[in-house]
Image: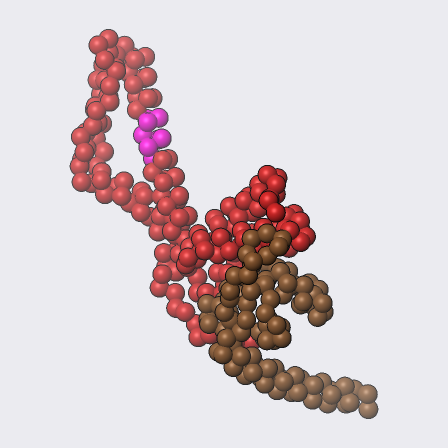
Amino acid sequence: MLVLALLTERESYGYELVTRLHEGGLDDLSAGTLYPVLNRLERDGQISSRLVASSAGPARKYYLPTETGAQQLWSTARAWEQLAATVESMLARATTKESS
Amino acid sequence: MSTSLRDTLVRERYLLRFSWAMQDFPKYKSIVRELRTELTATAGEVGMRQAVADLGHPHALAHGYLSGLGRPVPRWTTGAVWGALMVGAVVYLGAAYAIGTLDTLGQLGGGTVEREFLGATTTFTNDDDAISVSSTITWQVLVFYACVFTVPFLLGARVWRVWARTPEPVHA
C-alpha cells in the first residue's frame, strides 16, 4: 500500500523508493524486502515500469501505478482506515476502563 | 561509469547464490538481469558492498520473490542434482565392487567369476592374459537405474508441489 502511495506522488526507481520509505520512518525496511514487492505489483498489473537513462550507471527501471494499482490503493486505504478506526475505538474503551 | 573487477566479483557472487535459490521461479533470469542492472546503478550511489548488503541474504531475497507466487514451486534442478549424485554413488559402488573382485581374483592366483544381479550376468576375469569386466543387460537393470535416478529426482524436486493450489490473492 505504501509503495503504491509513494509511487502515486511521483515515479521512482527501486533504491529511491527504499530511501523514501526510510525518510518516511520505516528505517528497518531493506531493498531486499522492496524488490520482491515491486516484482509482485508489476506482475499483478498494479504498477508499470519504464527504463530511464542514469548518470550513475546503466538505465534504471522507474515505476508508476497503473489504473488497477490506483484502484487497489484506494480500496486498501479505505480498508486500512476502517481497521485503524476499529482498533482505535477498542483501545480507547480498554484504556478508559483501566483508568477509571 | 565502469564497475571495478572487485565490485563485479562481489555482485556476481551474490547473483550466483541468488540464481541458485531462484532456480524454479518462472522467468527468474529476467529478475537476475534486472537485479544486476539495479545493483550496478545503486553501486554508483552507495558503493557495491553497501548495495549488496542492502539486499540481505540471497536466499532471503529469493524467498521474498517465491513467497510472492503464493504457492510452493518444484525445484527441478535440485532434483536433477540429487538424481545424478545417487546414480554417481551407485556407479562408484559398482566400480569399487569390480575392482575389489578383480583384486581378490588376482590374490587367489587368477581366474574368472560370474555374478548375477537382476537377471544380468557380470563376468570378472583376472588372469595372465586379461583383466576384464563384462556384463549383459536386462530390462530389470535398466528399470533399477531409472529408479535410482528418478526417486531422488522426484524427492529432491519436491514434485508434490506441482499439485499445490494457488490460494486466492490477499491484499493487505
Which residue lies at the image location 55% right of the left edge and 67% below the top edge?
A: A63
Front residue (pair A75, B121): A75
Q: Position of residue B48 (x, y in %)?
A: 63, 48
Report the span colored magenta: B90-97
Which residue lies at the image location 58% right of the left edge and 74% below the top edge?
A: A4
In this view, B83 is above or below A62: above
In this view, B117 is above or below A27: above
Residue at the top extreme of this rendering: B128
Front residue (pair B89, A53): A53
Which residue lies at the image location 70% right of the left edge and 85% below the top edge?
A: A88
**Is residue A19 visible in this depiction of the protein?**
yes
User: Is residue B86 in the magenta section?
Assistant: no
Q: Colour of chain A?
A: brown
Using residue B2 as the reference point, say whether residue A89 is left or right of it.
right
The chain coloured red in the image: B
Q: Classify residue A90 by image quadrant.
A: bottom right
Front residue (pair B69, A47): A47
Q: How many numbered circles are shown?
A: 0
In this view, A97 is above or below B24: below
Q: Classify residue B30 by image quadrant.
A: bottom left
Q: Position of residue B149 (x, y in %)?
A: 32, 43
User: Is residue B91 in the magenta section?
Assistant: yes
Q: Position of residue B32 (x, y in %)?
A: 49, 53
* Quarter placement of the C terminus of chain B: bottom right
Using residue A13 as the reference point, say whether residue A95 is left or right of it.
right
